């Protein structure tokens, strides 16, 4: 063993040899899992099926969505890396050091430091962005003004800026293109509201809550004959709870249905046209 190798480099070479991966693919996964706090990762590498996403104990997505073997492989690799980062403090410290020194993260970073290091960041024209999967936050800065957005289940990887008109922003995620207008903005006081990306850095005016008029005191009633006791009040009928908006579980359900349809197609029960139509219909719900 080369004694001059860093802890990170020794880990990468050993991991690559044991799992039959290239060192570049291992390095990509290692940095992605570290940036996600050891619980999630967003990555893109040809050996891993292109762009993908991993959440510990949760959803796993790869470029080939019907390749269950690749999903299992990614889960195994990321879980082992996550365990190594928790147990090997020297490895975790070296990754943090490289992130703060080699890429301009940490001290002097332009985003809120409590978010840690982003898994992806970039700049285009007069704006820059950084995505933090652990906090599920997207920070966008334009002309020195910042706005913070809740990304929910999206894993942000790229930015596109419309050059004309309102210069609207859109980002790439595992679900496709997501418009900045569709992400709820996080205000300083924790208030969330969806804002147009044509004015994402403008504070919205607040309105005072309406004051309810006080009902007049009832005038005294003259004495009257005794009134028979009223029947006991009926128990209120519980109303059905409002349907909650679809979240991560609904997304998982849609992908599970698509996978079942793929099995039916493989068995010849569904034609290619029927499968494509159903798949498009399900993906349109995301």
Image: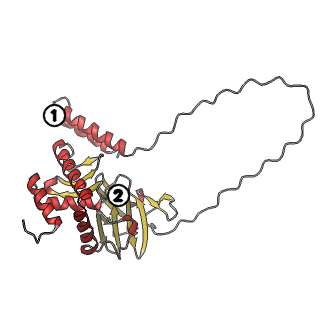
Q: Position of residue 210 (x, y in %)?
A: 67, 56
Left or right: 4 as drawn, with respect to 32: left
Closest to the observer: 129 or 36?
Answer: 36
Is 265 placed above or below 134 here?
Answer: above
Q: Position of residue 81 (x, y in %)?
A: 21, 55
SS label for mark 1: helix
Of the two numbered discs 2 and 1 in the rendering, the one whose residue sits closer to the viewer: 2
SS label for mark 2: loop
Residue under label 1, please give it.
266
Report whether residue 278 is seen: no
Is 134 placed above or below 103 here?
Answer: above
Residue under label 2, please give it.
134
Name the residue located 32 percent from the left edge and 39 percent from the top edge. Answer: 253
Closest to the observer: 124 or 239?
Answer: 239
Q: Residues within 10 Å of mark 1 (few under 14, many from 20)?
A: few
Q: Residues within 10 Å of mark 2 (few under 14, many from 20)?
A: some
Q: Quadrant of the N terminus?
A: bottom left
Nearest to N terminus: mark 2 or mark 1: 2
Q: Position of residue 110 (x, y in %)?
A: 37, 73
Left or right: 2 as drawn, with respect to 202: left
Is 168 placed above or below 16 here?
Answer: below
Is 276 placed above or below 270 here?
Answer: below
Residue 8, quarter of picture: bottom left
Name the residue located 29 percent from the left edge and 72 percent from the top edge. Answer: 100
Name the residue located 50 percent from the left edge and 65 percent from the top edge. Answer: 188
Residue 260, quarter of picture: top left
């Amino acid at each position: 063993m080369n004694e001059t190798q860093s802890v990170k480099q020794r880990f990468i070479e050993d991991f690559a040899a044991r799992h039959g991966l290239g060192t570049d693919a291992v390095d990509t996964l290692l940095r992605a899992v570290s940036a996600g706090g050891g619980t999630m990762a967003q990555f893109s590498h040809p050996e891993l099926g292109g762009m993908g996403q991993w959440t510990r104990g949760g959803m796993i997505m790869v470029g080939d969505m019907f390749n269950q073997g690749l999903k299992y492989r990614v889960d195994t690799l990321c879980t082992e890396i996550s365990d190594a980062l928790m147990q090997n403090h020297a490895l975790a410290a070296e990754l943090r050091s490289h992130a703060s020194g080699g890429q301009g993260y940490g001290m002097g970073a332009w985003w809120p430091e409590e978010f840690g290091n982003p898994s992806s960041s970039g700049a285009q024209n007069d704006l820059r962005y950084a995505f933090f999967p652990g906090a599920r936050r997207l920070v966008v800065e334009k002309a020195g003004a910042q706005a913070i957005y809740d990304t929910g289940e999206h894993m942000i990887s790229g930015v596109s800026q419309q050059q004309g008109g309102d210069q609207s922003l859109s980002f790439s995620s595992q679900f496709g293109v997501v418009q900045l207008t569709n992400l709820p903005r996080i205000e300083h006081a924790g208030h969330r509201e969806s804002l147009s990306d044509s004015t994402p850095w403008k504070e919205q005016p607040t309105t005072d809550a309406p004051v309810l008029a006080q009902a007049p005191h009832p005038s005294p009633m003259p004495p009257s004959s005794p009134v028979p006791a009223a029947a006991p009040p009926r128990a209120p009928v519980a109303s059905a709870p409002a349907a909650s908006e679809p979240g991560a579980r609904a997304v998982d359900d849609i992908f599970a249905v698509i996978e079942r349809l793929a099995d039916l197609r493989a068995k010849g029960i569904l034609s290619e046209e029927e499968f494509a139509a159903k798949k498009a219909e399900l993906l349109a719900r995301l």
